Image (tube, grey):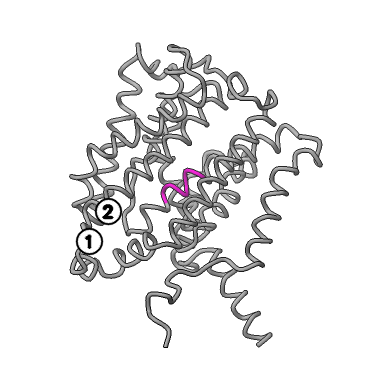
Amino acid sequence: MISSRHLPLYRKDGPLQWAWHSLVVVLLFCWPLWSGQPRFHLHLAIMVAIYSALAMSMNLLLRIGQLSLAHGALFGLGAYTSAILSRDYGLSFPAAFVAAGLMTALVAGLVGPVFMRIKGVHFALLTFALGEAIVLCFIEFHGLFGGNNGFGDIPPVSASLPVPEGRYGVYLVAISFALMVYFGLRLLYRREWGMIAASLQQNEALVTAGGLNVLAFRVSVFVLSAAIAGCTGSLYAHYQGFISPDAFGFWTAVNAVIMNVLGGVGALAGAVVGAVILVPLPELLRGLQQYQRLIYGLTLILLLLFMPQGLAALARDAMQKLRGART
């Protein structure tokens, strides 16, 4: 008889999944070389990579049933922290990048023990208030953050990293970071951590009865999510070279939520799929700029009504039907 301790608890990737992921990684790194590094397409790819990482950081909280509306502001806090340290204090991009993640993690660690005791709509309202307070600091403290005039002259990524100058160098860094976040969270989701997160969303009382410190687990999720958002903001700031409070408001957090809903909250790849679709959308709707928020809102409502599990669920169902047909 096989002992239960030797039974596999977590699903492992098979050869087909490894081959698929390897092919995608190779294509992502080689695509600019084959396409001649088109500037506009590189810009879109960089923004997709950045917002994919932000959406994946949001996916962490959605996994435990929490909706944070402060993620846009945490994204901005990481951007301003990195920009100030690199421009005014001469830190290199890697050092400022790490400091940005630590700063947002510190903020989440300070408010987390209070915020994570609250669930549902009240948690969303608390994080909304936190986000508005952070953005208000960006506006009011002119000497530090530049106010509504913004913060410019941020050193580029290539100034302290051995990467090509221009957008191609930033693309390599952005894609590398997004892939690190994806595979790191994928590994986390497929371990005991992922089982606990799923159980918390379904039956928290059962998890508590098992002896787990639920509050500490929730706070750790919030801290990790904030750290990823802060690092993402650092990369955004050094790519843009100029940042202002307008880029880190309420709608940035809402867009991260929509990306997850569009792709599918239950699949980490859904956050990436949502970013791939939503980020280029303003360019397609440039002539309807005044209606963009209305279109986003209608899109979210229609998705929740007719496709609540997102596009990733459609792909998963199609694969299951294909396997069933083969069987």
Q: Position of residue 13 (x, y in %)?
A: 57, 66
The image quadrant that residue 188 belongs to is bottom left
Q: Is residue 266 above or below residue 325?
A: above
Question: Quick one: label 1, few (<14), some, or many (20+) residues within 10 Å?
Answer: few
Tag 1 near tag 2, CB within 8 Å: yes
Q: Residue 201 or 1: which is nearer the viewer?
A: 1
Per the rendered image, the range of residues in magenta is: 53-58
Check disc 2 and report its element: helix, strand or loop: helix
Q: Is residue 179 above or below residue 298?
A: above
Q: Earlier in the sequence, mark 1 or mark 2?
A: 1
Q: Residue at x 23, y 51 (%)?
A: 216
Is 218 positioned to the left or the right of 318 in the image? left
Task: Judge whether residue 56 is colored magenta.
Answer: yes
Which secondary structure is most common in the magenta stretch?
helix
Q: Position of residue 149 (x, y in %)?
A: 44, 16
Which residue is under mark 2? 217
Residue 90 is tagged as none
The image quadrant that residue 48 belongs to is top right
Q: Give the amino acid at mark 2.
A: Phe
Residue 212 is tagged as 1
Check disc 1 and report its element: helix, strand or loop: loop
